[in-house]
Image (cartoon, rainbow, N blue to C red):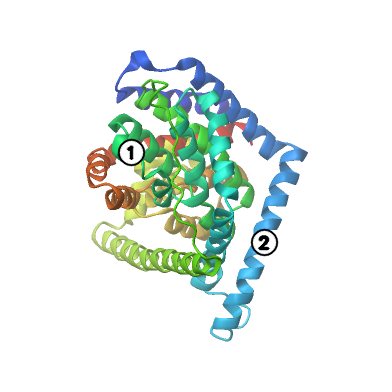
Amino acid sequence: MRYLISFCGLLLVFALALLISKNKKEIKYKNIIIMLIIQFILAALLLNTTFGYILIKGITNVFDHLLSYANTGISFVFGGLANKGESPFFLGVLLPIVFISVLIGILQHFKILPFFMKWIGLLLSKINGMGKLESYNAVASAMVGQSEVFITVKKQLDKIAPQRMYTLCASAMSTVSMSVVGAYMTMIEPKYVVTAIVLNMFGGFIIVSIINPYNVEENEDILTIEDEHKQAFFQMLGEYIMDGFKVAIIVGAMLIGFVALMDLINSLFEILIGISFQEILGYIFAPIAFLMGIPWADAISAGGIMATKLVTNEFVAMISLGEIAKSMSEHTLGIISVFLVSFANFSSIGIISGAVKGLNEKQGNVVARFGLKLLYGATLVSILTAIIVGLVI
């Protein structure tokens, strides 16, 4: 029965994508089927095999070491600020982003990241049937971030057609950046973070191939990666340190605002009608959670977490999940955890359109016009990933 319900969930995702498809005749079903099979294979490999366990354990160990190095710097600056044995969320989860940002800068500076982003993207283009630019962008988004990725292709922005811009932005919203992966791993199981990142990349291609199908002419499929003037090494370090700190501060500020606002709204709803706002959202999203493979006993709670992520952000949702995780089964936790690992929320619409507008005003206006459609597609990607994980765990 569980598999039948999840299969119905898959059909619903594809039906919702087809519902707003621009050109159903252009859909490349063969590529979609191939990518769907790849998703199932990767999910089973990462979550159900010894090789997957070793791989994820290795990645987790790398981030554990990186976070320990980051904590050395944090303790030097903020030592004694926290109570003994306790680590405030800002210090333990957000500030390590600064150190991860520095590492990204070093890998960028020595052209290591651009090399991998370009060639992995070219390989993916052979599988997904899309252009080299779209494939590169999906890989780059996962490495450098949803707004920073557009800087690397800013020379081409003015020439990109609206349908291709939708694909680029949907990829950016469907994945997460390497700089926050370590933070996620302190809040949910690392194996689900790694699995979600990999599956979301292919899931993004699948959903976009249905919602926004098109063909790229060979003469249009040119990939030009921006190669900015070479900075001095320590100048680059300073910039990435400040960029990482800005991200940590921004995320912290958003958490203060969103968590406080959510608490206020929940309190008002409980006073007025005797039920919290998150519980109401839970009932609305419960059928979707159920079709993702979550037992009905957990569906309302899971639906509330899903809705929280959509209207606020993934950090707020992960905090909420941590508060009720002990009451959920491992199966439910796995499904809801992978759903949370993406930038699919309302605030991302403004972040992405603002980033593009800062580089090219015309294209920024284009992105703003299909903002809700972007969120719709990216949310379907998260649901698709969650269903696949629910089928293999």
Which quarter of the rendered picture does the C terminus lie within? top right
Q: Residue furthest bottom?
A: 80
Residue at image location 23% in from the left, 60% down from the top: 272
Residue at image location 39% in from the left, 51% down from the top: 147
C-alpha separation, residue under disc 2 versus residue under disc 1: 33 Å
Of the image marks 2 and 1, the number of the one nearer the N terminus = 2
Q: The residue tagged with tag 2: helix, strand or loop?
A: helix
Query: On the image, which quarter does residue 263 sit in?
Result: bottom left
Residue at image location 60% in from the left, 49% down from the top: 112
Q: Is residue 287 visible?
A: no
Left or right of 178, for residue 51: right
Q: What residue type is disc 2 on?
A: Asp
Query: On the image, which quarter does residue 84 sit in?
Result: bottom right
Label 2 neighbour load within 10 Å: few <14, some 14-19, many 20+: some
Q: Position of residue 337 (x, y in %)?
A: 53, 47
Label 1 neighbour load within 10 Å: few <14, some 14-19, many 20+: many
Left or right of 107, for residue 167: left
Query: On the image, which quarter does residue 173 sit in?
Result: top left
Q: Position of residue 93 (x, y in %)?
A: 53, 66
Q: Nearer the viewer, residue 193 or 117?
A: 117
Q: Nearer the viewer, residue 137 or 200?
A: 137
Q: Position of residue 369 (x, y in %)?
A: 22, 39
Residue receiving disc 1: 374
Q: What residue type is disc 1 on?
A: Leu
Residue at image location 62% in from the left, 51% down from the top: 190
Q: Position of residue 378 (x, y in %)?
A: 40, 38
Q: Are marks 2 and 1 in contact (CB under 8 Å)?
A: no
Which quarter of the rendered picture does the N terminus lie within? top right
Residue receiving disc 2: 64
